[in-house]
Amino acid sequence: MIIKHPAVCGTLESSDVMITVAPGNGEVAIDLDSTVDMYYHDAIIRVIEDVLRAEGVDSVQVSAVDHGALDCTIKARLKTALVRSSKED
C-alpha cells in the first residue's frame, strides 16, 4: 500500500485513539502519545507495526494519540487511516 497524502481516523475521546498517517521518507516512523504509555507503550507500538507489516506499508509517518483504546480499536483506526491516505484526492 502506498501512502499518498495525510489522513486521520479516530477521536480524542476516552477509550479511543486518533491515528494520523502521512507519506514517509522511506522508513516507518511512529510517534505515540498515550495516557497509558508507561504500561502499554511496547504493546501499542507492536500492534501498529503488525498492521503496517500486514498491509505492506514500509514508508509512513504514524502519529497516535491514545486514550486507552483496545487493540482492536487501534487496528481499526489505523487500517481506516491507511485506506483513506492511499486513495486519490
Image (cartoon, rainbow, N blue to C red):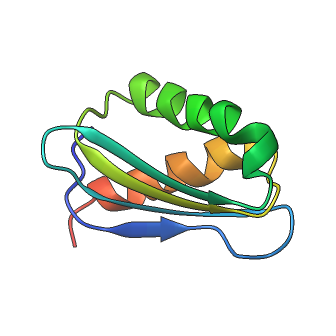
Q: Horizontal and vertical percent for residue 24?
A: 20, 50
Quarter occupied by the N terminus: top left
Q: Is residue 71 visible?
A: no
- Which quarter shows the C terminus? bottom left
Direction from residue 9 to residue 62 in the image, left or right: left
**Residue occupying the point 33% across, 45% down:** 29
Dividing the picture into quadrants, the one containing residue 64 is: bottom right
Residue reaching furthest front?
A: 38
Q: Is residue 32 above or below residue 56?
A: below
Residue 21 at x, y percent in the picture: 38, 59
The residue that appears at 77% across and 61% down in the rendered structure is: 35
Front residue of 52/33: it is 33
Q: Is residue 37 above or below residue 71?
A: below
Q: Residue furthest left?
A: 25
Q: In the rendered view, would you say 11 is above or below 37?
A: below
**The quarter of the displayed image where residue 55 is located:** top left
Residue at 19 percent across and 58 percent down: it is 4
Q: Is residue 56 left or right of residue 5?
A: right
In the picture, measured across the screen, residue 28 lies left or right of residue 25, that is: right
